[in-house]
Image: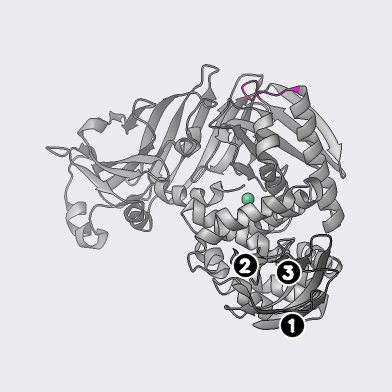
């Protein structure tokens, strides 16, 4: 689900490392040139201090970045699960004494570092340090403060590192912050490195920002900052399928169990989704892509990259059972539908955070075509995920500002957003709605679109003013709050009643009236209120509003004149 994207932003902030002047250069210039003291010296405090700080504080320091850092980084993977290598770097444009920061992330004893500057070994345990803890993100970082007294304009450094942990083990995904490339980082503006990655045959490596690597690679000027979620994976099963004009290679490592039945069902889900998406959007977003099943991610986590050859990563671990393809196929197929939806929304065309609403809309759509129980799927999402977590936050606010709490973020950006596009489909009808969707992909292929662009496209395609729809659904946090009132039963088979919306939306609404033997479905525009009349074959037993889950609305069940009212 690209759920990780939000996390990435925070992590980028955390691992940005910084250099800054210890003293104000203009103040000290005079004195410096007149002395001929030592060219280079590390200044250790008499007693090292440990301070606690926050991501926000580190972000502040990050804004004061002045000096340049560049170097050559090697990353070697050993099949025992460890990663080791070196970073040869230089810090340039130093005007004066310098404060360097060294960030390390992760559990103690996992990372071993040996750092030297201009040939001087740095004793980390003698340095002042900041600790950052964020339990929500499972983040623990140490920021070492290295005070350097120097009059040199440039210094050279070397970091030797070794990470001892198993990538594909049980590590919580959010502990893999920084990845092998950035579990540590040294301060400096730029952060472009020449990168060499080596690993034995029989493995693949996923590098965010680049894609899937099959063998040793060297890259110039690679930006390692903010790399999140890189991993090595042992190649187990490799399955190739073609569908909808796309060639897909599926990698399943040996530690993600895979019966031939679950693999067939996985392929079937992928094929069904891709065929449907190509049909409704009228386009093939990429000729080729990879799917990686990742047993160290939960089956609720996924990611789709917008790299040259896209990579779709699907978590396959479960808290109840060992990692398997079956976990995701039988318990969370929506994740597969969502991630594949990103090939269109997020990859082929970009809409910022609205990508998540649109990819989840594709999930709803695929679910409605492939699962007979899809209405209860939508009802559960409405009742248990969206309605308890609306928190007076409009979609437009959530799109602009983002939401850190994953439960609220999913409720609003993913699910409510998806429901609102489903509601738009209901308002416009399939033909116009999917025409709009196709136009949207065309319009936003080369540029990132926003909500106004989306409104414009749907207004142009439908020839209708949709300001009312967008303002009530995207620009307020409210959802319709329907009641059935003033019900009268004249004779035995005439029923009439008012529908009142306490939140005063203008929306078409499906209303179903059931008798013991028949169901009557009608669509009515509710503009705050509406009055309905039904001529029935016998006495009604139930009235259901929104029986096909076209929208998020407040849900309740009650009885009026002996008739069950289900506000669905
Ligand atoms: Zn997503």
Within 10 Å of disc 1 (Cα), the crowding (few <14, some 14-19, many 20+) is: few
Could you say where residue 32 lies in the image, as x and y percent from the top left? 20, 52
For the point 49% across and 58% down, the residue is: 403
For the point 86% across and 67% down, the residue is: 431
Q: Which mark is first along the chain, 2 or 1?
A: 1
Which mark is drawn over residue 465?
1
Residue 448 visible here: no
Q: Mostly what secondary structure, the magenta segment?
A: loop
Within 10 Å of disc 2 (Cα), the crowding (few <14, some 14-19, many 20+) is: few
**Residue closest to the eye, 22 or 429:** 429
Q: Is residue 550 left or right of residue 46?
A: right
Q: Is residue 182 left or right of residue 238?
A: left
Where disc 2 sits, the SS reads strand
Residue 90 visible here: yes
Could you say where residue 513 lies in the image, as x and y percent from the top left? 77, 68
Quickly name the residue at label 2: 559
For the point 70% across and 35% down, the residue is: 329
Quickly name the residue at label 3: 424
Task: Answer above or below: position of 528 versus 29.
Answer: below
Task: Specify whether residue 531 is painted magenta.
Answer: no
Q: CA distance from mark 1 to mark 2?
A: 38 Å
For the point 46% across and 54% down, the residue is: 405
Task: Answer above or below: position of 388 versus 319.
Answer: below
Q: Which mark is first along the chain, 2 or 3?
A: 3
The magenta region covers: 253-259
Q: CA distance from mark 3 to mark 2?
A: 31 Å
Q: CA distance from mark 1 to mark 3?
A: 13 Å
């Amino acid at each position: 689900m690209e759920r990780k994207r939000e996390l990435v932003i925070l992590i980028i902030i955390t691992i940005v490392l910084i250099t800054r002047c210890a003293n104000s250069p203009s103040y000290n210039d005079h004195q410096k040139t007149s002395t001929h003291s030592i060219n280079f010296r590390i200044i250790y405090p008499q007693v090292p201090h440990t301070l606690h700080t926050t991501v926000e504080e580190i972000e502040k320091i990050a804004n004061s970045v002045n000096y340049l850092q560049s170097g050559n980084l090697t990353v070697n993977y050993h099949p025992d699960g460890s990663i080791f290598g070196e970073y040869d770097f230089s810090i340039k444009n130093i005007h004066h004494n310098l404060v360097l920061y060294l960030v390390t992330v992760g559990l103690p004893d996992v990372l071993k570092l040996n750092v030297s500057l201009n040939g001087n070994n740095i004793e980390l345990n003698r340095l002042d340090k900041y600790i950052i803890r964020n339990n929500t993100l499972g983040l623990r970082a140490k920021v070492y403060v290295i005070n350097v007294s120097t009059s040199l304009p440039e210094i050279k450094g070397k970091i030797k590192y070794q990470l001892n942990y198993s990538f594909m083990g049980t590590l919580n995904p959010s502990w893999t912050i920084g990845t092998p490339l950035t579990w540590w980082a040294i301060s400096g503006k730029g952060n472009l490195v020449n990168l060499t990655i080596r690993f034995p045959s029989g493995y693949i490596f996923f590098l965010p920002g680049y894609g899937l690597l099959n063998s040793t690679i060297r890259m110039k000027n690679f930006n390692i900052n903010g790399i999140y979620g890189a991993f090595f994976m042992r190649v187990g099963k490799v399955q190739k399928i073609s569908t909808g004009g796309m060639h897909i290679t599926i990698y399943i490592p040996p530690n993600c169990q895979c019966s031939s039945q679950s693999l067939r069902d996985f392929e079937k889900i992928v094929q069904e989704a891709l065929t449907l998406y190509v049909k409704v959007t009228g386009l093939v977003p990429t000729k080729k892509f990879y799917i990686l099943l990742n047993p160290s991610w939960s089956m609720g986590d996924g990611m789709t990259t917008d790299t040259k050859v896209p990579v779709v990563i699907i978590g396959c671990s479960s808290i109840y059972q060992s990692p398997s393809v079956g976990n995701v196929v039988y318990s969370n197929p929506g994740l597969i539908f969502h991630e594949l939806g990103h090939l269109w929304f997020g990859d082929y065309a970009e809409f910022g955070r609205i990508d998540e609403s649109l990819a989840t809309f594709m999930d709803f759509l695929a679910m409605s075509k492939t699962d007979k129980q899809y209405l209860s799927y939508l009802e559960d999402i409405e009742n248990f995920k969206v309605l308890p977590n609306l928190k007076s936050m409009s979609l437009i606010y959530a799109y602009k500002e983002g939401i850190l709490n994953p439960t609220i973020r999913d409720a609003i950006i993913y699910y409510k957003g998806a429901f609102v596009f489903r509601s738009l489909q209901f308002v416009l009808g399939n033909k116009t709605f999917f025409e709009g969707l196709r136009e949207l992909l065309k319009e936003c292929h080369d540029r990132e679109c926003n909500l106004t662009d989306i409104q414009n496209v749907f207004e142009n395609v439908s020839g209708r003013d949709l300001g009312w729809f967008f303002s009530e659904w995207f620009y307020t946090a409210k959802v319709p709050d329907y009641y059935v009132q003033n019900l009268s039963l004249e004779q035995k088979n005439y029923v009439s009643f008012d529908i009142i919306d306490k939140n005063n939306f203008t929306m078409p609404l499906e209303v179903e009236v059931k008798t013991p033997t028949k169901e009557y479905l009608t669509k009515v525009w509710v503009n705050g209120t509406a009055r309905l009349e039904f001529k029935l074959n016998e006495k009604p037993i139930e009235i259901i509003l929104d029986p096909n889950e076209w929208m998020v609305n407040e849900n309740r069940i009650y009885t009026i004149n002996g008739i069950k009212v289900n506000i669905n």
